[in-house]
Amino acid sequence: MAAAGPSVFLLMVNGQVESAQFPEYDDLYCKYCFVYGQDWAPTALPLASVSRVDGGAGAEEGPWTVTRTEERRQHGDKGLEEGISQITSKSQDVRRALVWNFPIDVTFKSTNPYGWPQIVLSVYGPDVFGNDVVRGYGAVHVPFSPGRHKRTVPMFVPESTSKLQKFTSWFMGRRPEYTDPKVVAQGEGREVTRVRSQGFVTLLFNVVTKDMRKLGYDTGPPDTQGASGPSPPQGLPP
């Protein structure tokens, strides 16, 4: 009897919230969470089917995978859907970057690509009175193709609708912010929100997919940037 084909595909995402550029602010920390469609759900990764992709077992799509058994035993097989980083200060070099290197690690399953996961970022830091206030919101889709990817996310903050409200919120230490940061990844109601651009956050993604091609989805050629392999012999004809 022929084996039944897969009914879902897997999306494994790991990487890190690497750094940020906020020239006017220091001592910041970052929160992240994922937003995804109704057909998506976090799932346990079948570790036995994942190996280094040099053409071995589990190497269906993507130039590599990293087996992280110990981390998944500590954090749960599903990974982490949300997290909060440490507080960091600006580097002492000319870049004046805020470096977190905060890890991301989660696995999803789905039956179709609609509602592809997005990661929502919220950056916070102290104001002049020592109150924690939001310094930026941003969101970006998880890359669609397997491989290593780098994304720079422009951040923004909500603005008060009048100068009086702006002064009051500054004096009271209660700046405008979203009650649910996930609204950043949605379009509904955004047109009535006044915002101001402020800073950038850099993310690194390592993406692996499984069974997408078996279900008829083609994400394009794998991105092999950063994947090491043997060099071709020199002086031999092609």
Image (tube, rainbow, N blue to C red):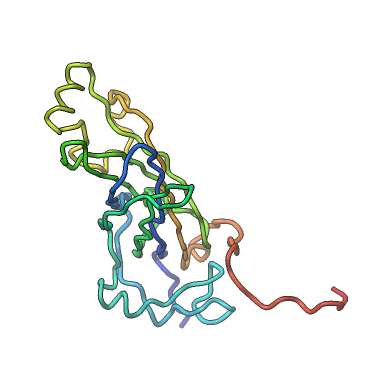
Does 18 sit left or right of 82 as displayed? right
Quadrant assignment, res 72: bottom left
Question: Residue 174 vs residue 3: left or right?
Answer: left
Task: Identify the residue at image location x=41%, y=42%.
Answer: 200
Instruction: Answer above or below: position of 7 versus 52.
Output: above
Q: Residue furthest front?
A: 92
Q: Quadrant of residue 101?
A: bottom left
Q: Quadrant of residue 12?
A: bottom left
Is residue 163 among what the camera can see? Answer: yes
Most foreground residue, 42 or 119: 119
Depth check, front residue: 111 or 79: 79
Q: Please report the residue visible at 37 percent of the width from the left and 52 percent of the height from the top.
A: 117
Measured from the top left, where is residue 199 in percent x and y?
A: 39, 39
Look at the picture and state if 178 lies above or below 11.
Answer: above
* Residue closer to the observer: 63 or 194: 194
Q: Position of residue 100 (x, y in %)?
A: 35, 57
* Residue sitting nearer the eye, 176 or 182: 176
Tell me the quarter of the image containing the C terminus.
bottom right
